[in-house]
Amino acid sequence: MAILIEAGPDAAQTWKKVLRSHESNLDIRIYPELGDPQQITSLLSWKPPSGLLPRLTSLRLLQCSGAGVDQLLGHPDLHTGIQVARLVDSGQARDLATYVLGAAVAWYRRLDIYAAQQALYEWRRIFPHPRSADCKVGVMGMGMMGQTIANAFMACGFPVSGWSATGKALNGVETFSGRSKLLAFAQKCNILVCALPLTPETRGILNDELFQVLASPGLVVNVGRGEHIVESDLLAWLERDQLASAALDVHKEEPLPSSHPFWKHLRIRVTPHIGAFADPQNVAWQVIENHRRVLAGAPPVNLIDFHRGY
Ligand code: NDP
C-alpha cells in the first residue's frame, strides 16, 4: 500500500525525505511515476491534476498538503469513497500570526509614515500616540489560525473579539457566532482580520455592509482567500474613508495581474500569498498516521466535512 506525493519537484523530494525519516519502509511514489496505480491508497496533494484521481482506483485518502481545502470542494473526480483530510500545523499558525501582527502594527504604529520621513531626514512625532488598548481587533474565523492570531494580539494588549460559526470560546476574547451576529461583532473594530476558510457561506463576506460598520481608522487584513473580498466594495470603502487601509496576502487571481488596481493603491499592502506554510517536519506524522488509519478502516485526523466545506 503506497503513498503518492503530488507536488513541485523540490517539495516532493522534501516530503519523501521527511516521511522516510519518520518511517523508513514506507512505499512512497512521486507523481508522475505511479508504478502500479492499484497499490496507491493515499495521495498527498494540494489539488490533484485533472485525470489523476480516476487512475487511482484503490485510493482511500486524499491528504491535502495545505490548511485550506476550498480548491478541492468542487473537484469533479472526488467521489465518496475518498476521505479528505487537511494538515494542521501550530507552527504554521504562529507564522501566520506574525504576518498579521506585522501588517497591523506597521499600519497602527505608522511605521510606513516614519519610513517615509526617514528618507527625508525628518524628525517628526505624530500624536496622539497610538496605544494598543485603544485599537479594537476582530478576528473572523476562530480555528487553528484565528485563535493563534487572537492570542498574538492579546499578548500585545489589543482588545480582541472573535467570530465563528459555533462561537468558539477563547480566554480573554469576546466571541460572536453566526451571520446574525456578524455586524455586532464587526461594529467599531479598527482592525478586522479574515482567517476564514472559503466556503459558499463565506465567499464575498468582506463587503460594503461590513466595511460600513468598521471604526475609523480601519484596517482589513485578509489571510483567508481572495474570494472573501468583494474587490469593488473594498476600493469604494478606501475611496470614501481616507483613513482606511488594507493588507492583502491572498487574491482572487494569483498571481495578482499587473493591471490590477490593488498594486498601485497607496493604502493597500499586497503580498504574494506568503502568510505561512505547513512545515513537513511538523506534520509528517499526520500523513503517516492517516495513511495507517484509512487502511485500518478508522477515520483520519483533521477530516474535512464536505457538507460544511472545511
Ligand atoms: P479551521 O478549520 O481550523 O477554522 C475555521 C474557522 O472558521 C472556525 O472557527 C469556523 O467556525 C470558522 N468558520 C467557518 N465557516 C464559517 C462561517 N460560515 N461563519 C462563521 N465562521 C465560520 O481553519 P484554519 O484556522 O486552519 O484556517 C483557516 C483558513 O486560513 C484556511 O482555510 C485558509 O484559507 C487560510 N490560511 C491562509 C494561509 C496563508 O498563507 N495566507 C495559511 C493558512 C491558512 P467553528 O469554529 O465554529 O467551526
Image: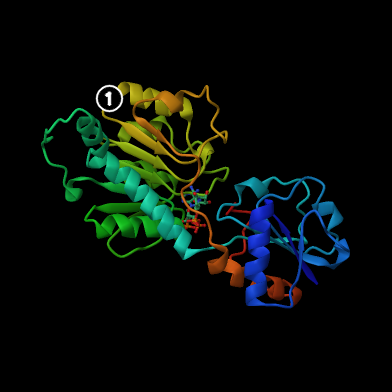
Task: Give above or below for 14 relative to 51.
Answer: below
The x, y position of residue 220, in whole percent, is: 36, 38
User: In the image, is the residue at mark 1 within 8 Å of ligand 1 by its beta carbon?
Assistant: no
Residue 1 spot, x, y in % from top left: 80, 72
Judge by depth and name the residue closer to the eye, 76 or 185: 76
Helix, strand or loop at label 1? It is loop
The quarter holding residue 60 reads bottom right
Please report the residue visible at 69 percent of the width from the left and 75 percent of the height from the top.
293
- Identify the residue at horizontal 86%, vertical 60% (top origin): 57
Q: Position of residue 84 (x, y in %)?
A: 67, 60
Q: Is residue 188 above or below residue 240?
A: below
Image quadrant in which the C terminus is located: bottom right
**Figure check: 139 above or below 14:** above
Write the residue at 44% across / 58% down: 93
Q: Identify the residue position indicated by label 1 in the image.
A: 242
Neighbourhood count class around disc 1 (C-alpha, 10 Å): few under 14, some 14–19, many 20 upward: few
* Image quarter of residue 2: bottom right
Looking at the picture, how far across and down is residue 16, in whole percent?
68, 65
Given the image, on which type of amino acid does mark 1 rest?
Gln
